Amino acid sequence: MKHKLIFLLLILLPILLSAATGCDLQDPDKDVKRLFPGSTGFKTSYLSVAKSGGKALLTRIETALGDKFSGTYETMDVPYTLYHVYKNKTLLGYVHGVNQKGQYGGLQVFLALDPGGKILGFYYQKLSSKNGAKFKSTAFTNQFVGLSLADFKTLDIKTGKGSGRAAAIKNPAGTDKDFLFTLRGIKKNLVLMNVFIYKK
Amino acid sequence: MDNMIIQSKDLSKIYLRGAEKIVAVDSVSIDIKEGEFVSFIGPSGSGKTSLLHLLGCLDNPDQGELIVDVFSIMKDGKSLSEKKLTPIRRDLFGYIFQKFYLIPTLTVKENILLPYAFMPRNGERQSAEAIAEKLGLAHRLTHLPKELSGGEMQRVAIARALINKPKILLADEPTGNLDSKRSDEIAGILSDLNKEDQITIILVTHNPVLAAKAGRIIELEDGRIRD
Amino acid sequence: MPGISGIAYKNLRRKRLRSVLTVFGIALSTWVLVSLFGFNKGYEASLNKDIDNLGFQVLLTAKGCPYEAATLMLQGGKGLRYMPEGIVDSLKTNPEVDELTPMLMQTVFDVNKGEEGGVVGYLGIDPQTYPKMKTYLKFNQGNWFTQNDAMEAVMGYEAAELEQREVGDMILIPEKEIEVKIVGVLKRSGTQDDGTIFLPYKTVQQIFGLPGQLTSVGIKVNKSVDITAYEEELYKIPDVQVVSMAQVKNTISNLVSTARVMVMSIAIIAILIAMVGVINTILMSVLERYQEIGIMKSMGATTAHIFRLIWFETIMLCFAGGVIGSAMSAVLGKVTDSVIRYILPYAPTGSLVRIDLALVVRAIGIIVAIGLFSGIYPALRAARIRPIEAIRSADGEF
């Protein structure tokens, strides 16, 4: 009987998994509490470039990012999950993650942001790298705290060069390309937050 | 012309109404010649309609003998089965009633031709138009019964009764629902049919003018013929 | 010149609303009936297709080993057991076997996955036999491996989406720090293969140092073979367990038969209601036309004529209702599908309700037959009317 049940589960599994893949927190309750220790609750909304403005918006996003959206998975209709974090009725900030193609797999780049657009925290929910420990170390991730989109304005995400505080951050793993992919992921995250929320 | 088309001997019909026995037709013996025009008169309940039904093979007698054309309808206390009566009614008789009994969903033409729906396909057929013409209905063929006057409706019923070329036409109060002008019209038609086409006509009526068209008037009372 | 069918048709138009309502009632019953037949047929077919999509009817695994990579990951990557590769050759000699495919599952712990790390699973397959069993797997990009032991991977659609991988990209096998090249990305199949990363099983043996080891063998049995009997044979092999898809199918069928009985009862009730409706309509129309029918009999209509007249009316109502109901079931097939999906405890993928011409003809046939049956009593009542009774009842005189 146990075998039969497991098989039923196996057949049902694809149905459970078939939802479109965006970029959700693995355990929203726990993750939000960790990123905003003072929070009492959060609200979730789902956004996409296609729904919010379509092709024209995509062009604006690409210009701001300094790169084209590319590949099979970075499309206009990818759903973005945005968590609005509250302490009672006061908005503490947002949690927003994006998928970013990396060297050996998908990066999931999550930012905790204050209501004005300043980065409160950055972490990888997912990362496939030989230098994973270096990228995930707080020595590297904490360098992004306090930055906002304005600090990335002159940063060329293809080379990592430019002026300002973001461009000053060094690759923690020598020449590992995942550094550049990370910068692109963070900038993409900020650009999307700007068009969805801050609208500066 | 002296061929008898209907011969009855001691013909009786008894109904039971509750425990009461009502003798509607009481030992009636009557002979009707082919081509004769006979009318039955008498008060309500005199049994004239019951007698008409018996002679027209619509109802089964309880006693006596009845021969219609070449058929023994009732003999030795036995009447023919419903199954055998059906073709006799179809081929020998045409019936006309006080209430015209037209089918409301069918046109005049279809009503006239209705008997053909129940006849073998190979039989000889008359056209509805010819009969309609004769009865002054030519312009009404495509109409529905509800669009006709009472007189026209009865003429349609007559046309329907004639479509199978019956030898005998039975008419039960054919003018009962009509005013005097229309009644005269119908009386004229029946009279013409009898004279020109030699159709035997048996008529039941209250109407003395209509009854007077007949060659022979038989008066009934309490189910018996009054001498 | 009116025929009997013409008279019947015109009569139905006399009380148009009543006829329309009766037809509608019959149409609803037909809808239920057609959908039910369609369900019996479509459900069976969809279930069989789901089972066929698994590719093999029997899965042989080392005793205690989970069945598939996804299950393995759900269990946290624990419990892998192995059996020697040689078993494939010995199974090949069995006459019952149509095709075989060896598999080797492996998992690694990826410290970079999530906050606390997570398990990643790989399924080692044989590029010669596996694709033949899973013919529904189609490529979005690329193709299967170039060699039996190539350092190459094929990813299910969802796995590729999660890893943002395209053909030509690399993936890293954690712990081993080995790079593998993506040569193919599959289209969505709606099965758990969507979330699977495939490698040649020889490559998996090599990377994880498991020469000559397998975790499972998929067996496609010849069509004529009694699977249950063959499974008994397989149990004689030491240290293996047999997982049968036929068993799964039975379990699901049992679950559904309860629901089917429920649907069947609804159908029978619907048919009974339609039947009562038909009897009522026709009987009323007979009683209303008592005199008309009597007059027709005086004109020479036989019992058979009248019986036919009334039967025609019944057939017309039922046929119209049957045709409309079938059309409804065809048009509303999707709605029916989702209603059934909602009711059933388990529904396979693919369309549940399959409606074809043969089925529609059968349903209309049944409805007309039911109509004929319902028409018998009113038609007999009508046929038995004697002309004299009809006339007398109208005149009230004798």
Image (tube, coloured by chain):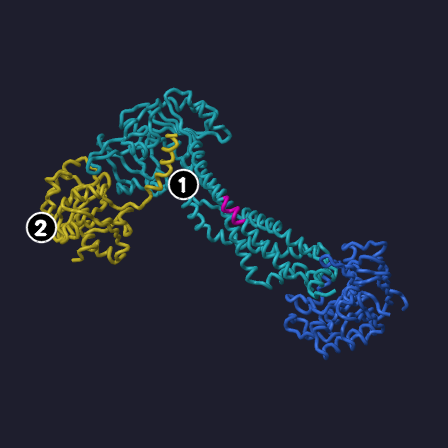
Q: Residue furthest right?
A: B2
Give the labeled residue for mark 2: A164
Q: Which chain is blue?
A: B
Give the labeled residue for mark 1: C345
> Where residue B25 sits: x, y (%)?
80, 63
Q: Is residue A147 above or below residue C246?
A: below
**Do the dots labelled 2 and 1 sit on one chain?**
no
Horizontal arrangement in the rendering, residue C159 relative to residue B52 (left or right): left
The mark found on residue C356 in the picture is none
In the image, what residue occupies the spot 74% across and 76% down?
B183
Position of the C terminus of chain A by quadrant: bottom left
Q: Is residue A30 above or below residue A77?
A: above
Horizontal arrangement in the rendering, residue C34 relative to residue C8 (left or right): left
Query: Which residue is nearer to you in this view: C90 or A10?
Result: A10
- Give the magenta-colored segment's residue range: C264-271
Amino acid marked by disc 1: Pro
Q: Principal SS element in the magenta part?
A: helix
Disc 2 secondary structure class: loop
> Where residue A32 sits: x, y (%)?
18, 44
Rounded to the nearest angstrom, the CA distance separating label 2 from label 1 is: 60 Å
Position of the N terminus of chain A by quadrant: top left
Q: Which chain is yellow?
A: A
Q: Which chain is cyan?
A: C
Amino acid marked by disc 2: Gly
> Where residue B103 sits: x, y (%)?
66, 65
